[in-house]
Image (cartoon, rainbow, N blue to C red):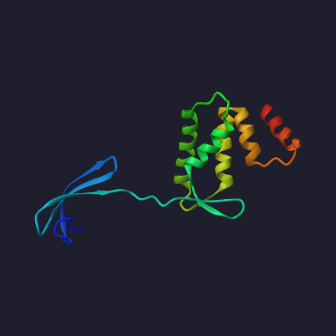
Amino acid sequence: MECPYCHKVGSRVLDSRESSVGIRRRRLCEKCQKRFTTYEKVSIVPVMVLKRDGRREIFSNEKLESAIKMACVKRPITDVEITNIVEKIEILINKNYQNEIKAGKIGQMCIKYLKKLDHVAYIRFASVYRDFKNIDSFTKEVELLKR
């Protein structure tokens, strides 16, 4: 670690503590004897989402939340419930997928949670996710839901 005062490389750690931004370390420069603080933060490699058309993009919980909110418009669903779904899905993705996940997998996770929460929001989301081609496929999904 380079001293911010004398720019010599080499310091001793006096104290380490966890803080809201990561790990806080108090250091002592071996040359000038001045003390300084450094912060270490864990860097997480982002998970890439593989789209249907072959494109890849970084997973965005904001984009996921927006899609779920669109399905829940004018439904008795709170922002807290939507945020909980997004958090659960984000945890599953970070836990089970290191590098890449197909967009369809994320859609399946959303459908699972929305089906439990609200049937109308579920059908709205499924109509976009499953890309219903005609009224028959839409009706079939509603019939499955009724059972």
Residue at 10% x, 64% y is 33
Q: Is residue 147 visible?
A: no
Residue at 52% x, 53% y is 94
Q: Whole-percent x and y of residue 146?
A: 80, 31
| Residue 6 as seen in the image, left or right of residue 108 | left
| Residue 89 as seen in the image, left or right of residue 141 | left
Q: Whole-percent x and y of residue 91?
A: 52, 48
Q: Is residue 13 visible?
A: yes
Total labels: the figure holds 0
Camera-side residue of 62 and 121 = 62
Quadrant of residue 58 within the rendered picture: bottom right
- The C terminus is located in which quarter? top right
Q: Is residue 52 above or below residue 72?
A: below
Residue at 85% x, 49% y is 133
Q: Whole-percent x and y of residue 80?
A: 54, 33
As drawn, the residue found furthest toward the bottom would be: 8
| Residue 123 as seen in the image, left or right of residue 117 | right
As drawn, the residue found furthest toward the front would be: 5
- The N terminus is located in which quarter? bottom left
Quadrant of residue 42 within the rendered picture: bottom left
| Residue 96 as seen in the image, left or right of residue 102 | left
